[in-house]
Image (cartoon, helix red, strand yellow):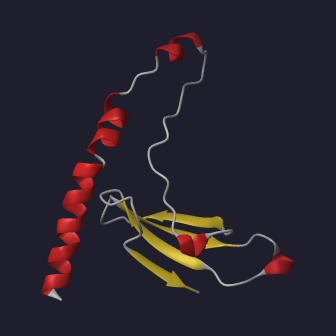
């Protein structure tokens, strides 16, 4: 258990360095064209939280973790009542956006 926890921390540190440029762009990015748009701005896409398990599924829920502010859970499923199938719940961290920390098939 201790080795697994240590590996997860190391993976987060490596990924944090990998995605540092994106985080800096988010923090300091300023679009000059925003000054010409009244009442609206430009949104810079940062990450795509996705895994192969959720292919062809819709996001049906999203909830931020109140204790760990960098983590959130996403529910994937179907909005079509006649085509219900299995769903997936994925827990993502902003410290490691490359893949979910945990995933559960429902």
Position of 19 with respect to 53 (left or right) is left
Depth check: 71 or 25 in front?
25
As displayed, is residue 22 above or below residue 39?
Answer: below
Q: Residue at x 82, y 77 (%)?
A: 81
The percent coordinates of residue 76 (x first, y second) are 61, 71
As displayed, is residue 65 above or below residue 38?
Answer: below
Position of 68 with respect to 30 (left or right) is left
Position of 37 with respect to 67 (left or right) is right
Q: Residue at x 54, y 64 (%)?
A: 62
Count of labels in the image: 0
The percent coordinates of residue 14 (x first, y second) are 21, 58
As displayed, is residue 101 above or below residue 23?
Answer: below
As displayed, is residue 46 above or below residue 3?
Answer: above
Q: Quadrant of the C terminus?
A: bottom right
The percent coordinates of residue 60 (x first, y second) are 64, 67
Position of 81 with respect to 38 (left or right) is right
Report which quarter residue 82 is drawn in: bottom right
The percent coordinates of residue 55 (x first, y second) are 63, 69
The extreme top residue here reads 36
The extreme right residue here reads 82
Q: Residue at x 27, y 57 (%)?
A: 15
Q: Quadrant of the N terminus?
A: bottom left
Q: Residue at x 13, y 85 (%)?
A: 2
């Amino acid at each position: 258990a201790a080795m697994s926890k240590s590996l997860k921390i190391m993976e987060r540190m490596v990924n944090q360095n990998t995605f540092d440029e994106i985080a800096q762009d988010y923090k300091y990015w300023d679009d000059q064209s925003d000054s010409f748009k009244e009442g609206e701005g430009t949104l810079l896409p940062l990450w795509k939280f996705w895994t192969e398990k959720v292919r062809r599924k819709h996001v049906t829920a999203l909830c931020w973790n109140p204790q760990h502010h960098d983590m959130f859970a996403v529910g994937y499923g179907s909005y079509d009542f006649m085509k219900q199938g299995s769903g997936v719940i994925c827990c993502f961290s902003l410290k490691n956006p490359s893949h979910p920390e945990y995933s559960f098939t429902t």
